[in-house]
Image (cartoon, coloured by chain):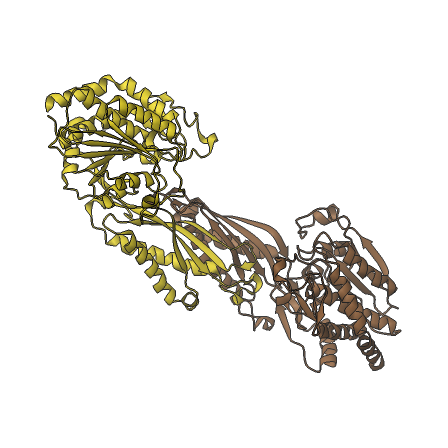
Chain colours: A brown, B yellow
């Protein structure tokens, strides 16, 4: 296989300018949610050029929207298809899903951008634009890896299923649709921006809202009312206790360098409308981290139970218990044990390209890997070029060097995993 | 004086239906802030009928708006005058200000009202409508008292200065304008709805806003940020400590039945805009009660200093101290010592009418009495018909019986205080 490795590495090296132009074109077709079709068309064109069998479809239907894991604020996905390209192997090898999402988050305040958010401007080895890091750079690494293998005349034994999906940023409806359509494999790589680290485990998360009742009164006689803010403070304290308790249980070495492996973040607190009134309602909104080996249901129950027990210790809250809602987005955690062969294969490939060992950690955020893993039963490693911090920022950019290195590592891993003839 | 007392009490008794109709007319002319002129016209007409010398003027000008105590959200008061009616005494008696405000608070949700808010509907001895309790009922008590004295042919020795002012609900610009125009007296009665109690002392108040800085981060790595909510909770705790400390200093027996004589109410708390972000700003708004014998400046300094000291004990808050603003409305406290002759005169009059002793307390809210007392140097007792709880509610009403009893008590007190020939 050394000869094959040399070929694909040389191919990628020789076609760097072409790769940059290609990433530039994909970034220039801004693909904010609901407007993914033009960028998707460029991806599909490339897959066809590479001779892959294409499956292009508009997601939807009750089997998707009624699925317990389905999570999106829209129900109509017309005009913006999912795209899957299949590179059929010769047989006798392991199959591999390569998954990237085409949707990007909104650009935010335009004044914060130095260049047009969809410029694809290249300067000092960086390519700028919304989606460059999250995660068009990673998707281009996948396609460069496949192009290098195919155009080097290498035949794989196992099947490769390349997926360019919509709706990752809103909770993974695109990847869920692909799983429900039957796409499963012996392993999967998702090149989200991990800064070239391996994330075999990913923190899941979901959003909650807690409504806390008080009793209105005039501020001058505040003792005649019950402050919803004060009652909410009791619950905030309990949420911090629960966060401590939940995190003290996590002993996985992948989390050893993470101060709070599965945080419970309070993102929003609003109560009251008048300085001199006692507020009668407080609303807390937050994000609960979910451990890789935990079900969403277990995490939900634990929060609800903790709030209930605390409320039982307070005469007002006992009579007026807080109401907990799980709303908006939720992301399943991903859980692959560190000794899985996919991790070994990727690690070897990494070391061959970079001459150092990879950093293997748990991610502080979830990806579509959670759905592939927990719904599809697919072993997933999240690994890709780009830095998380960049992902949703103004002036998002990606280091092009990392895109090419990731392409090399992934190309070698594909050959090792699927086998070559 | 027994004969004179009998006359005025009989006059009021005989003219009850006329009194009800008069209160009805004044309530029917809704006088929400900025629309006081029609209701004011009815008051002015009555004063003219009683032969009072009228001073009707539109408040404003720099001497008012630049006054340190001036507090209003408008600068233009055109079209809605202050009205003062003077009943000149024969000489040799003490002067008395009788002060009522004509402005009423908004009606709120119309659906909560059983009758039109400005119906003046009378049923089972109650008169309904916005302003009936706060404080047109009280103002009618004043005018009935004066009418009874004048139409009974009684001549007072001291001057009576009847004031119907605008802008009490927003912080007292109307009464401040009257004080600055030179109206002062040896005593004053303000018939705000005290439920027939005497309030020689009134709690002052002012509004504050505290801005607390945090540091944004993704909720999944919340340890990379600093939660503005958590930092604000430290300050909320300190505000409660300060409230304890300030109230433990109050030993005045007038406050003995009040659980928290000068509360610090947190009325509003808002922070964050996204469940999975660490919020970088929290805004607290509240109302600080001010003791009768305390200056506003002292109360402000005490809060600011407490927050500063607490912030010094927290490494983040020390570097990012909270910003305190004093905004919106503020009301001066009122402070009359309980043995003042005005309290004695009113108490005697009360007992003569009701055959019981009055309840003398400190009020949990301020009135224009604070301005009359602290800016004008006038001894003030707040005493009137109606229940505070009703004041700003839907279906506001007043017990007519109390309006007439208050009129009797005030009429007798006027005669005792000013003296009769």
Asked whether A94 or B244 is in front, the reply is: B244
Image quadrant in which you'd find residue A301:
bottom right
> Where in the figure is residue B354, as x and y percent of width and height?
19, 27
Asked whether A366 or B250 is in front, the reply is: B250
Left or right of B307? Residue B219 is right
The C terminus of chain B sits in image quarter = top left
Left or right of A418? Residue B391 is left
> Where in the figure is residue A412, as x and y percent of width and height?
78, 75
Image quadrant in which you'd find residue B125:
top left
> Where in the figure is residue B292, as x and y percent of width and height?
24, 47
> Where in the figure is residue B247, as x and y percent of width and height?
27, 52
Asked whether B400 or B104 is in front, the reply is: B104
- In the rendered image, is residue B367 in sight? no
Q: Is residue A332 above or below residue A402?
A: above
Residue at screen point 71% across, 76% down: A347
- In the rendered image, is residue B400 in sight? yes
The N terminus of chain B sits in image quarter = top left
Residue at screen point 29% across, 18% down: B18
Left or right of A248? Residue B194 is left
């Amino acid at each position: 296989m050394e000869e094959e490795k040399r070929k694909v590495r040389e191919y990628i090296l020789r076609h760097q300018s072409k790769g940059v132009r290609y990433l530039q074109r994909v970034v220039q077709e801004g693909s904010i949610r609901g407007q993914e079709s033009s960028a998707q068309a460029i991806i599909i064109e490339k897959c066809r050029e590479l001779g892959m069998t294409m499956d292009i479809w508009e997601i939807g239907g009750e089997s998707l929207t009624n699925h317990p894991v389905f999570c999106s604020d829209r129900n109509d996905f017309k005009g913006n298809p999912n795209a899957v390209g299949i590179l059929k192997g010769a047989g006798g090898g392991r199959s591999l899903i390569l998954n990237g999402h085409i949707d990007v988050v909104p650009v935010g305040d335009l004044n914060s951008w130095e260049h047009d958010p969809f410029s694809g401007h290249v300067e000092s080895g960086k390519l700028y634009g919304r989606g460059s890091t999250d995660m068009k750079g990673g998707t281009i690494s996948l396609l460069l890896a496949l192009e290098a293998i195919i155009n080097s005349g290498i035949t794989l034994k196992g099947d490769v299923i390349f997926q360019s999906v919509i709706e990752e940023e809103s909770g993974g409806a695109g990847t869920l649709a692909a799983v429900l359509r039957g796409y499963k494999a012996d392993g999967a790589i998702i090149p989200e921006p991990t800064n070239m680290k391996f994330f075999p485990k990913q923190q899941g998360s979901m959003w909650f809202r807690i409504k806390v009742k008080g009793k209105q009164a005039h501020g001058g006689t505040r003792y005649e009312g019950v402050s919803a803010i004060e009652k909410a403070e009791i619950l905030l304290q309990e949420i911090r206790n629960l966060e401590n308790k939940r995190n003290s249980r996590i002993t996985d070495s992948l989390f050893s360098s993470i101060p709070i492996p599965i945080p419970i973040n309070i993102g929003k607190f609003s109560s009251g409308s008048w300085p001199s009134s006692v507020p009668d309602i407080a609303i807390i909104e937050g994000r609960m981290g979910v451990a890789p080996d935990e079900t969403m249901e277990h995490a939900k129950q634990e929060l609800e139970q903790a709030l209930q027990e605390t409320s039982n210790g307070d005469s007002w809250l006992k009579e007026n218990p807080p109401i907990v809602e799980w709303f908006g987005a939720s992301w399943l955690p991903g859980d692959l044990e560190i000794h899985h062969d996919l991790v070994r294969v990727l690690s070897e490939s990494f070391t061959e390209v970079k001459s150092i060992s990879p950093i293997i950690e748990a991610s502080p955020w979830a990806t579509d890997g959670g759905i592939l893993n927990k719904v599809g039963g697919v072993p997933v490693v999240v690994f890709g070029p780009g830095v998380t911090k960049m992902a949703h920022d103004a002036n998002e950019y990606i280091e092009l060097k990392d895109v090419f290195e990731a392409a090399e590592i992934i190309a070698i891993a594909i050959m090792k995993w699927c086998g070559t003839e």
